[in-house]
Amino acid sequence: MNRETSIAIGRRVLTTEAGALTLLAGALDDSFAAAVELILGAAGRVIVSGMGKSGHVARKIAATFASTGTPSHFVHPAEASHGDLGMLARGDVCLVLSNSGETPELADIIAHTRRFSIPLIGVAGRADSTLLRQSDVALVLPAAEEACPMGLAPTTSTTMTLALGDALAVALMEHRQFTPENFRAFHPGGKLGARLSRVGDLMHAGEEMPLVATGTPMADALLTMSQKSFGVVGVTDAEGRLSGVVTDGDLRRHMAGLLDRTVDEVMTADPLTIDPGALAERAVAVMNGRKITCLFVVGADGRPQGILHIHDCLRAGVA
């Protein structure tokens, strides 16, 4: 098989599945809205289940729900028949996936939801299937050919089911007004967590800040600058507001008679600052753009709340 043939096959599969997703988008109706409302109204969790390839998709959907503000977990239907049905309780909503809607391993989990009045949302490719006939809300996948040339391996059907799960998750996110702060709470590690870090999460505060008052002799300011190891010192006025900073550049510009001066004579007035609620990514962009390594973090009242060094951002994975 040559490379051109491989590329042609790949394109055919992707085109087939893309067409199926277009069909799915057009097929969404009030049942989709009912499923969203059912989940939003649940006091408990969304229990997602499926067998085989549908089970793999169900695990991903449960993980997506859980990370975007909808408490959820996966229950394997075979394990459910051997004790894990106890993971389903009143107040939960059960989302069950099956392309045929006749998967025998799902029988016990379906019966359990009916016995204990646990709302059931079914996803399947046949409206007259056992799963969808038993469901409180039936989500029917439109008829679309599998990308597998034999029409046997779940390909297009699993893609549609996965995309439908994403559609539910995003609809729920928007209804819940899920924010980047909420997202970061569920993703504290890795690149996503780093990208959503706030300046206030990374800054040095309290006694770590290199601060002196206006009128301070430069000899004392240099001592503070050396002790705090940020390469700068902030200057505060009588009300505690940040009025200036002394940087290495300021020292070089005032070398002649430096120790005979006060910070007011040497400092750069009205320095560049950043808000504690700003994204750390924004702070890195500002520091890179101005070719500086530190930013004082200042609140709405003008008082310094901390200091952020570019190395703090790099250690946290913000770049």
Image (cartoon, rainbow, N blue to C red):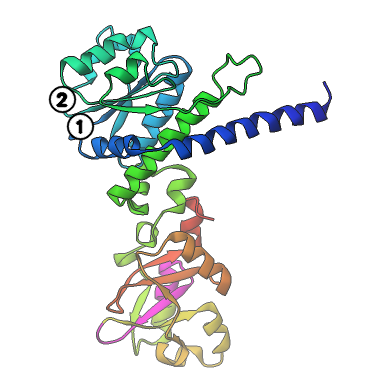
Report the amino acid beneath label 1. Answer: Gly
Q: Quadrant of residue 1?
A: top right
Q: Nearer the viewer, residue 311 or 93?
A: 93
Q: Is residue 232 magenta?
A: yes
Query: Which label was assigned to residue 90?
Result: 2
Report the amino acid beneath label 2. Answer: Arg
- Element type at mark 2: loop
State the residue lying farthest toward the front: 128
Relative side of 256 to 100, left or right: right
79 shown above or below 31: above
Residue visible at 19% across and 23% down in the picture: 118
| Residue 84 screen position, x and y as percent | 26, 14
Relative side of 179 to 268, left or right: left
Residue visible at 42% across and 19% down in the picture: 126
- Element type at mark 1: loop
Q: Quadrant of residue 59?
A: top left
| Residue 34 screen position, x and y as percent | 28, 37
Residue visible at 43% across and 47% down in the picture: 193
- What segment carries the magenta color? 223-239
Q: Residues within 10 Å of mark 2 (few under 14, many from 20)?
A: some
Q: Nearer the viewer, residue 308 or 72?
A: 72
Q: Nearer the viewer, residue 94 or 267?
A: 94
Can I make out residue 185 in this image? no
Query: Which label was assigned to residue 44?
Result: 1
224 shown above or below 280: below
**Mark 2 or mark 1, earlier in chain:** 1
C-beta proximity under 8 Å, tags 2 and 1: yes
